């Protein structure tokens, strides 16, 4: 047993060099100051620096955290521990795998680097968020997490079957129910997918999720693409809603003619139910180019028009009817004149840019398995089934 400055080391064998004040302990080593316990097969204690090195594996425990690693350095005077090589951090709502972790007991902060894989449980609604990244910061006292460097998130909601996948350079979870993402944000869910420069999402008091998109975002609802300067997505019950403002452009394929129906305006409201687009309304300087089947069987005609507003109704994901209201002006084009019909100003339709939810989920799960192999992750089976 070695006792000094509040630290006590017990082991089966101890060797202490009095001149250098360095101790070596082997066999069932246990270091504690009364609040922290470290257990390992071998430890080297530097008395002058109040530092202990563990080179053959270690388990660390304090009031909030358990860490295991193949190597660790514990600084007693600072209540700080550094872990490296196959590190696992376990807290009441978090399991974290990393190449290295710096853990501060007094502030309940942890910083992790390299091959991050984390499983976080929101205890208020049982939503689990799996995270992959190059670095992670965790403040357990505030229940906040920040990940950076090729950050990827997969959200598992126990209430419904939906699995949401998110990718960005930086993702911040400042408190339960809130999420902020920046730089090349990509999100794919069952009902929609989008790309944006930044995302700000929070849970409302009613339990719905409001997500604001910035930086000329593009959203896809099935085959319909919406582009605008800013958007707000509301995930709720019984329907989801999408609001867009500023240079709104909507493109949706016409299945009969293979051409692209187009809408533009300054404000948009879209309603989605059961992962399907039900209605779409566009207002303020509304313009449209539409293609439809004429009374002559097999013939396609076009319509170019404008008005104060227009409303699309969908049935089974297909456009069912269109309604214009007030100030309507338009021109019909026979089938042999469709080539004279020019695209609306600001035309954009890029179906190849739509995030592929299946591929994103498969890639996420493959990387997750690689990073947690050999670890006891409670997320493995549920994630694999959901994916």
Image (tube, rainbow, N blue to C red):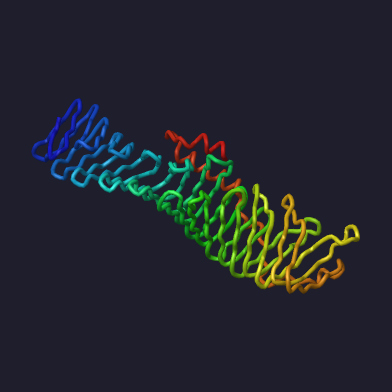
> Residue lying farthest left?
19
Q: Is residue 65 left or right of residue 127?
A: left
> Residue lying farthest right?
296
In the image, residue 343 sits, relative to residue 101, either above or below, namely: below
Q: Is residue 168 left or right of residue 280?
A: left
Q: Residue at x 44, y 42 (%)?
A: 121
- The residue lying toward the viewer, choosing from 174 and 384, is 174
Q: Quadrant of the N terminus?
A: top left
Q: Position of residue 59 (x, y in %)?
A: 30, 34
State the count of labels: 0
Q: Position of residue 188 (x, y in %)?
A: 58, 51
Q: Quadrant of the C terminus?
A: top right
In the image, residue 126 sits, relative to residue 231, either above or below, namely: above
Q: Residue at x 83, y 70 (%)?
A: 332
Q: Is residue 36 left or right of residue 219?
A: left
- The residue lying toward the viewer, choosing from 36 and 327, is 327
- The residue lying toward the viewer, choosing from 75 and 293, is 293
Asked if residue 357 shows in the view, the reply is: yes
> Residue lying farthest top?
12
Q: Is residue 147 left or right of residue 43?
A: right
- The residue lying toward the viewer, choosing from 118 and 172, is 172
Q: Residue at x 67, y 73 (%)?
A: 285
Asked if residue 348 shows in the view, the reply is: no
In the image, residue 14 sits, relative to residue 45, either above or below, namely: above
Q: Position of residue 113 (x, y in %)?
A: 37, 48
Q: Position of residue 234 (x, y in %)?
A: 56, 55
């Amino acid at each position: 047993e070695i006792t000094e400055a509040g630290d006590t080391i017990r082991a089966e064998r101890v060797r202490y060099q009095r001149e250098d004040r360095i101790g070596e302990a082997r066999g069932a080593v246990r270091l504690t100051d009364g609040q922290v316990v470290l257990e390992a097969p071998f430890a080297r204690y530097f008395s002058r620096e109040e530092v202990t090195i563990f080179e053959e594996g270690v388990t660390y425990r304090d009031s909030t955290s358990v860490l295991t690693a193949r190597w660790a350095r514990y600084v007693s005077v600072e209540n700080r521990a550094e872990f490296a090589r196959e590190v696992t951090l376990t807290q009441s709502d978090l399991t974290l795998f990393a190449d290295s972790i710096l853990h501060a007991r007094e502030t309940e902060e942890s910083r992790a680097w390299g091959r991050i894989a984390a499983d976080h449980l929101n205890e208020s609604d049982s939503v689990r968020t799996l995270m992959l990244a190059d670095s992670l910061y965790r403040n357990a006292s505030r229940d906040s997490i920040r990940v950076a460097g090729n950050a990827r998130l997969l959200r598992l909601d126990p209430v419904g079957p939906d699995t949401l996948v998110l990718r960005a350079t930086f993702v911040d979870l400042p408190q339960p129910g809130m999420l902020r993402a920046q730089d090349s944000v990509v999100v794919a869910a069952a009902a929609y997918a989008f790309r944006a420069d930044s995302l700000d999402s929070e849970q409302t008091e009613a339990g719905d999720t409001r997500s604001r998109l910035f930086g000329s975002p593009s959203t896809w609802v099935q085959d319909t693409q919406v582009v605008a300067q800013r958007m707000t997505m509301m995930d709720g019950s019984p329907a989801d809603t999408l609001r867009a403002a500023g240079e709104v452009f909507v493109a949706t394929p016409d299945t009969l003619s293979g051409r692209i129906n187009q809408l533009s305006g300054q404000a948009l409201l879209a309603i989605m139910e059961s992962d399907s687009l039900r209605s779409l309304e566009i207002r303020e300087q509304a313009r449209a180019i539409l293609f439809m089947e004429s009374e002559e069987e097999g013939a396609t005609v076009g319509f170019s028009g404008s008005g104060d507003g227009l409303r699309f109704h969908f049935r089974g994901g297909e456009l069912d009817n269109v309604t214009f209201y007030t100030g309507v002006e338009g021109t019909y084009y026979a089938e042999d004149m469709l080539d004279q019909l020019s695209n609306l100003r600001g035309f954009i339709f890029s179906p190849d840019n739509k995030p592929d939810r299946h591929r994103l989920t498969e890639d996420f799960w493959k990387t997750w398995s690689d990073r947690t192999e050999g670890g006891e992750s409670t997320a493995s089976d549920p994630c694999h089934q959901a994916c």
